[in-house]
Amino acid sequence: MITITENAQQHFGKLLAQQPEGTNIRVFVVNPGTQSAECGVSYCPPEAVEASDTEIKLDLFSAYVDELSLPFLDDAEIDFVTDKMGSQLTLKAPNAKVRKVSDDATLMERVDYVIQTQVNPQLAGHGGNVSLSEITEDGIAILQFGGGCNGCSMVDVTLKEGIEKELLAQFEGELNGVRDITEHARGEHSYY
């Protein structure tokens, strides 16, 4: 579920004191489960509360989450941070783009989740991404590189020293290796 830190609660409390009585907040995800997912917080007047909303009761107010956004806000955190540059509200939602999978999900689902939430954010800095095509009977994850990774001279190092080590450590005894099936073509899309 969502964590709203004490600092964030105090910040929202001050903002809500200036709104009509009974106004709370709504936490939501636009385009949940997609790469274009965006999280947000808005005022939620009493007439905007839906019967299917989940209410998170806090000391000063309640936070409402719509039924569609709820699974994508698992492990989310809202904080209000003050530093030398000023103050800002931060909303971290690691599962907004990919729904968190349960521990008893299939190996394919669990590996894909790690790729989408841990591997691809690292590759995105180079304009690349990777997707899981299949897992063979002998425990080899078959990956397909895309974006800036396609044709990159460092793709073998990324595969063996980065992705494979990470996946084998997290899925010890379940995965035995990774293999790239991408037909790498050099071009202007490559990062290097």
Image: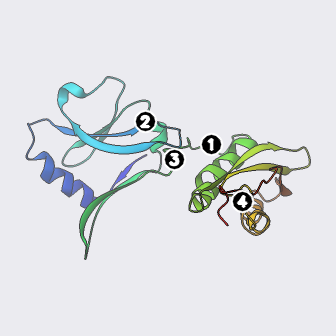
- Give the foreground label among 3 and 4: 3
- Residue type at mark 2 is Ser
Label 2, on which residue? 69
Picture quadrant where residue 184 is located: bottom right
Q: Quadrant of the C terminus?
A: bottom right
Distance in Å between CA atoms under marks 2 and 3: 10 Å
Label 4, on which residue? 170
Task: Mark 3 and mark 4 in contact? Answer it, CB < 8 Å.
Answer: no
Residue density around tag 4, few if under 14, some if 14–19, many if 20 or more, within 10 Å = some
Label 1, on which residue? 102
Callout 3: SS: loop
Q: Is residue 132 visible?
A: yes
Residue density around tag 2, few if under 14, some if 14–19, many if 20 or more, within 10 Å = many
Q: Percent from the top left, x then y, of residue 69?
A: 43, 35
On screen, residue 161 versus residue 87, left or right, reads right
Callout 1: SS: loop
Q: Percent from the top left, x then y, of residue 25?
A: 24, 41
Q: As drawn, which residue projects farthest toward the top?
A: 51
- Residue type at mark 4 is Gln
- Residue type at mark 1 is Ser
Q: Residue at x 74, y 68 (%)?
A: 154
Task: Mark 2 and mark 1 in contact? Answer it, CB < 8 Å.
Answer: no
Q: Taking 47 as reference, is 174 above or below it?
A: below
Label 3, on which residue? 95
